Every structure is written in structure tokens, then in C-alpha cells.
Image: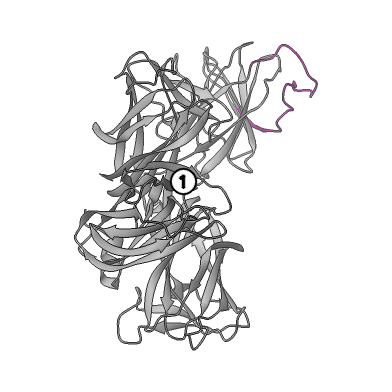
Amino acid sequence: MLFAPRAGRPRSVRPPSGRSVLAAGAAGALAVVVALVTAAAPGAGADGRRQAPAPKPPEISLDDTLHQLTFTPGGGTAVASYTYRIGNGSPAYRAGAAADGSLTVSVPATLDDIGRQPVTVRADDASGHSSTTVTGTFSFINRNPGSADYQVRRVEAEALLPTGTAQTTAVRQTNCCGGNRFSGGSQAWFRATRTGDTYTLPFDVTTAADYAVVLKQTRGPDYGTVSYAIDSRRTGTVQDGYAPTVSTRPVSLGELGLTRGIHWLTLTVEGRNPAASGRYAGLDYLELTPLLQHEAEHLLPAGRSATLPLAREPGALWSGGAQVAFTGRRPGDHFALGFDAPADGWYALGTEQSTGPQYGRVSFAVDGEAAGTPFDAYRKTAATRAADLGIRYLTGGRHTMTFAAAGRRAPSPRYRIGVDLIKVFPLTGSYEAELVTSASTGRSSVQRNCCGPMWSGGHQRLVRALRPGDHAEFTFAVPLDGPYSLNAVMTRRPEYGGVVFAIDGRPAGRFDGRTHETTTRPVHLGTRDFTEGLHTLTVTRTDGAGPAAGHAFGVDRIDVYPEDEKASERAAHPRF
């Protein structure tokens, strides 16, 4: 194998499939050794003993295609080679550095196409002295983001019916009870007879990623209450399957990180509604939607896209161990980061912004058009906060998110901007409320997980409604004309109060958020006909009942699903 590096540029080396390879170059070319090795202890030489001096820890960067990693020297003695691992359970490799001390390696094709993977690396000099080991976490993409691996995947439950427990009988049931109710013409029907009956369905995940997991549950007059677990982990809330007539409805199991391979969905019968005549259960399908979230520092552009220099700033505060840092000199100074939309469609866009005493206000744009509202990043202490950029229709492929200095508070001495994450969530029926808030009165903020519940996106939209009538508006997208069911997943707490809902200005129900403990509850807002395009859900505080009435409300998620199966099929393959 021959490596012929171009002057001034790091060479690309793919880890070998065998145990060791010696690559000999032509006369004058730098020979490269790529070999499977056992990593030495941090700061140790080849003989395992601590030696000095040694190179300083290297830096790790991922190119904007998410295909290649580059290791660069951190200083100290000249770097001759790097020892590195890419991915969980991978072997360690050693590869020689280029003349400038850097090394570029391709992400192994065996890694999952979507997913956060650890990378460890240390720098070695020609005498065998080694730096301490640096670890980073990166999200890799090895294939075209428009490939099927990135699309919503629906699995018919009846196709997963090989095995059940001895306590239940599970069969394929075709459309019944007066209509074509099931998406594939049939459902998985669990004819449970007692509380505690369980059934487990295996399903395959082809690409490791974080997924929004939704199933279509069947309800009827003889259906019981059920709970769900994935890989033995309880997800979602107990669902009442009773309905006067047979129908189906979507149930969100939240957002889960799933590895490639077989996983297990377990249904457990918890009892029955007093009005129900049995404990049956039914599943129409399981739907997996990949959620895309990018470490901002991995999107640093190779070319000029800023009015002033950008920097990758390491630190334990940020999710991948680093952020993109920018310090402007005046309002209007800006920079841009590129990101990919997997396919044509509607997306909820957001960022995780750094806050602190040195930070100013920042405005956002996507592909040159203003997005969201300016974000005030000044705080007395350092932290990160979510910023909502709203809903945008994106074509599949490359897009640009621009961050601009928009002013600062008097206490802040700088026009500083820090970006930890860029969030690009495809909208397939579940909308994270913190990302789709389009307007609010009162004090509106994004609240992280706390107090017991696990909000589906790790956050909720919290509105401290100081006066009756204070409200928040949430924008959602409907792909095609037709009837849709709506749910709002609301938070209940002792200090929360009552709210009323309106959809496009029309009343849609009410909800009392007060309770003795912190919980979440889905609120069904009915079924109505929508035209294709954007619509608005408004949540408004009502007058409280008595002195204990609360003045806040929290919205976790909004679910919008086609009611009829023909609309469901069309929405799964929209004609945008």
C-alpha cells in the first residue's frame, strides 16, 4: 500500500482490516505505519514507564461532511504518530503524522450511520513519549443523508408476531367492526384474559440513532388498560384502551436512543376501565423517526463564513466537550454553520446556546431568512439554554444557519456567541413544544428535565402566566388536507393552573394542571379537518379557582396524526 501525501495537507488513512500493515513510500516520501496496537497508559512511553518531555494533548475535529476526523498537535515536542480508537469496542490503531504533525483518518464504514460514538487519541513523538489521552464524542454520517436509513420507518405490528408468553394469545386480526381501520389491513390482537398478561414483539433497528417512538393503539369496548416497555425499560404512561366503538389512536413512547440490532417492545395488561367488558389489547403499527442533533463544533466550516475568526472551545459544560465560540466587535458581526436535512419536508429547528456574563444577544437566520427571535445569552453564571428557531420547510441536502451579534446588555462587555448544538428534527406528527413556540405573553422559557418526569425532548415549554389571558402559541404543520387527531402532552404540578386550548382560533377543550406531584398527561383535543400547511395551537391561562390557583403551565409535546388510514398513508409519503 502506497501513501503519497500532498505537501501541506494531512493524509487520509483508513484503518486496515488486518492486524498490521507497513506502507512503504517512494524515495523521499514519509513512510506510514498503520498497525493494531494496545494503547499505552497516558503519559507513558512504549515500555510503559512515564517519560518526559512528551507532546501536549492533541485536538480532534470532524469535517463538515461528517466523514473524516483530523488530529492536530497541541504543542510540545514534534508529533510523529497518533494512537486512536473510533467507536465503542473498536481496536486501537497507530498511524504516522504528516509533515505538519496532523493526521486525517476516514470514519470506518463499519460504524453506524447515525449515532454518537466516542473517539480517543494520544500523540506520540519519535522517541516514544506520549501525551495524555484525549476523548471526544462525535455524531458520524457515513452515507448519503437522503438514504432510507434516515427516513421515518413504520413497522406493521402484525408482522412481528412470532412469539408470545404462555399467558396470552396473539393473532393477526384483519379489518373488522365496520371499517378499514388498520394501516396494513390488519392488526396484532392480544386476547388477554387477566391483569398482568404480557406480550413481547421483536423489532429491528438498522441504524443507531435517537428516535421518536410512536405506536398506533387499538381501542374498543372490550379493551383493557396497558403499559409499554422497550428493552425492559418502561416508556410512556398507562393507556386506557376502552372506547365505545373500535378505533385507533397514536401513543408516543418518547425519544429513545436505540442501537443497531434487535429490540423488544413489551405490552403489559394493567387492568381495565370499569366500563370495559374485557382486557383485550391491539397494536396497528410501530413508527420510528430519527432525530438529528449536531454538535456545533463538528460543523465548523473549512472556508471563510464569518466576519471574525471562529474557535472550537473545549469545556465540560458542553455536550460534546466543546462549543463553537465567536466574539464580535460590533452588532452585525456574524458566522454561519452548515447542516444537512435528510429529505424534503417540514422541520423544527433549534439550537443549544451558551449563556454567561460575557455573552450578548444573538439573532438567527436559515438560508438567509430570519428565523426565531433574538436570544439574550447574558446570565450571571455559565450555562446552556435551548433557542427555538421555529418550523421551516427544507429540501433534502445542505443548508446554512447564520448567527449574528444583535446587541448586548450593559453588564456584558462583549458581543460573544457560543453554540453547543444544532437541532434539526423532522416533523412526523410529534412536535416538541419548546421548538415550535411561535408567540407568548407572560414569561416563557425552556425548562430542562426536573422534578421527576422525563419530558420527551429533555425539555418543556414553561409559561409563567402572570395574568388571566396570558398565553402561548405553537405552530405545527399538516402535510395534506384531511382529518387529524390532536393531543397536547401537558405537565401537572402543584403550582400550575388551568388552561383552555384553541386551534386556529376555535375552542378545543380545557385542562387543570394542578396536582400533588409532578406528572405529564396527554390531553386529547379532538379530531378536525385541516388544510395543508401551518396551523396554530393556543394555550391560555384561565382564572384560577381560589387562593391555591397556580399561575403557570407547561407543554411538553404536541401530537398531530391523520385520523383516517388513507390520510395516514398519504402523510407517510407526502408530495411536497
Q: What scheme was used to colour the molecule?
A: one colour
Residue 573: image location, x then y, percent: 28, 60
Residue nearest the observer in this picture, 500 or 236: 500
* Membership of 55 in magenta stretch: yes
* Residue at the disc numbered 1: 113
* Membership of 269 in magenta stretch: no
Instruction: Establish if 526 lies above or below 97.
Output: below
Residue at 20% of width from left, 63% of height from top? Answer: 481
Stretch of the chain drawn in magenta: 34-56
Residue at 80% of width from left, 21% of height from top? Answer: 49
Residue 402 visible in the picture: no
Residue 296: image location, x then y, percent: 44, 32
Instruction: Establish if 19 lies above or below 196.
Output: above
Residue nearest the observer in this picture, 376 or 541: 541
Q: Give the quadrant of residue 503.
A: bottom left
Kind of residue at disc 1: Asp
Residue at 39% of width from left, 42% of height from top? Answer: 444
Residue 397 visible in the picture: yes
Residue 387: image location, x then y, percent: 39, 37
Residue 112: image location, x then y, percent: 50, 47
Element type at mark 1: loop
Overall secondary structure of the magenta section: loop
Residue at 39% of width from left, 41% of height from top? Answer: 443
In the drawing, does residue 338 fall left or right of residue 197?
left
Q: Which residue lies furthest to the front in this view?
A: 547
